[in-house]
Structure formats: C-alpha cells, structure tokens
Image: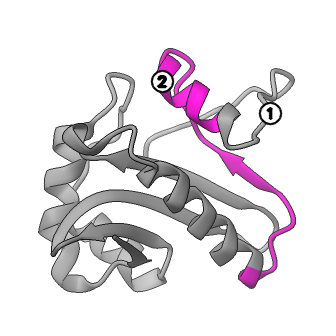
C-alpha cells in the first residue's frame, strides 16, 4: 500500500469511497468540482493498494493551522492501519507547509472516529465550539 497525493484520475474513485464509507454525521454533499479543487490544491491524500483506492484524508493548510478531515477507509479494509498511515502522511504534509498545530474535525457522535483520533495522539478540545454556515 502507498499513500500519495491524489491525482485528477482519482476523482471518481474518491467519490465512490466517500459514498461507501460515509459517516452518519456527514452533512456536506460531495461533488466532482469540490474534489477536483482539493486535488488541485494538493491537500487530498489517498491510500492505494494494488491499484484500488482504499482510503482518503484531506490535510488542509490555511497558513496558520493545519486541519485534517474526510478521513475515510473502505469498509472492508478497516482496522488494518490504513487510517494511521494517512494521519501520519497528513501530519508530514502539514509540517512541510509550516504547520505547528493540527485540528482534526470529527463528528461527536462518531465513536469509532473519536477513538481513532485519540489513539493517534490527538486530544479532545471540549473548550472550543465550532460554528458553521453553508454558502
């Protein structure tokens, strides 16, 4: 298995994986133009095994802080260390861009995701409220 930056040819496979692995709490629709932009900006990482896309992570950098989200692993490939490798690759990418702090966006109701991020060494920040607005 390799973890690499996504390429334009990965777009449809990313959308299929996100559909198959989608969290119950996910609220933003996925579409090809948004995925294409994430690929173009170089923050979408994919895990590929034998030519098949088995995981994704977006590692975004805003010049101040790194943000990781859309960590997804194919349902039949979970509990094989793929998520951990994606998180490590995301941290390396963000570190190379200058990040000294990383936030992982996780749905509170997703106990599996919460446990994964804790196992990866991330602490839950109960003191911050997140406000969002769809545009």
Within 10 angstroms of label 1, few (less than 14), some, or many (20 or more) residues? few
- In the displayed structure, does residue 130 sit left or right of residue 44? right
* Quarter of the rendering occupied by the N terminus: bottom left
Residue at 34 percent of width and 40 percent of height: 28
The x, y position of residue 80, in whole percent, is 39, 46
The x, y position of residue 86, in whole percent, is 50, 60
Give the mark nearest the N terminus, 1 or 2: 2
Residue at 29 percent of width and 84 percent of height: 7
Range shown magenta: 96-117
Colour mode of the rendering: one colour
Residue 82: quadrant of the picture: bottom left
Residue nearest the observer in this picture, 70 or 87: 87
Residue at 48 percent of width and 24 percent of height: 112
Kindly state the secondary structure of the residue where label 1 is placed.
loop
Residue 115: quadrant of the picture: top right
- In the displayed structure, does residue 65 sit left or right of residue 93? right
Within 10 angstroms of label 2, few (less than 14), some, or many (20 or more) residues? few
User: Which residue has dot 2 on it?
Assistant: 112
Magenta-span inclusion, residue 56: no
User: Which residue has dot 1 on it?
Assistant: 123
Residue nearest the observer in this picture, 69 or 122: 122
The x, y position of residue 131, in whole percent, is 65, 32
Q: Are marks 1 and 2 in contact (CB under 8 Å)?
A: no
Residue nearest the observer in this picture, 42 or 114: 114
In the depicted structure, whether residue 29 falls above or below residue 34: above
Kindly state the secondary structure of the residue where label 2 is placed.
helix
In the depicted structure, whether residue 93 falls above or below residue 46: below
- In the displayed structure, does residue 114 sit left or right of residue 97? left
Residue at 45 percent of width and 58 percent of height: 57
């Amino acid at each position: 298995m390799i973890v690499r930056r996504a390429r334009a040819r990965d777009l449809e496979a990313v959308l299929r994986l996100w559909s198959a692995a989608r969290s119950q709490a996910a609220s933003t629709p996925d579409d090809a133009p948004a995925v294409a932009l994430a690929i173009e900006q170089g923050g979408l990482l994919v895990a590929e095994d034998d030519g098949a896309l088995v995981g994704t992570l977006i590692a975004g950098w805003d010049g101040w802080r790194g943000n990781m989200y859309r960590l997804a692993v194919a349902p039949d490939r979970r509990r094989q260390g793929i998520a951990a490798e994606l998180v490590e690759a995301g941290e390396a990418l963000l570190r190379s861009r200058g990040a000294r702090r990383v936030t992982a966006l996780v749905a509170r109701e997703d106990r599996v995701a919460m446990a994964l991020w804790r196992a990866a060494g991330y602490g839950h920040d109960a003191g911050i409220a997140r406000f969002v607005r769809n545009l």
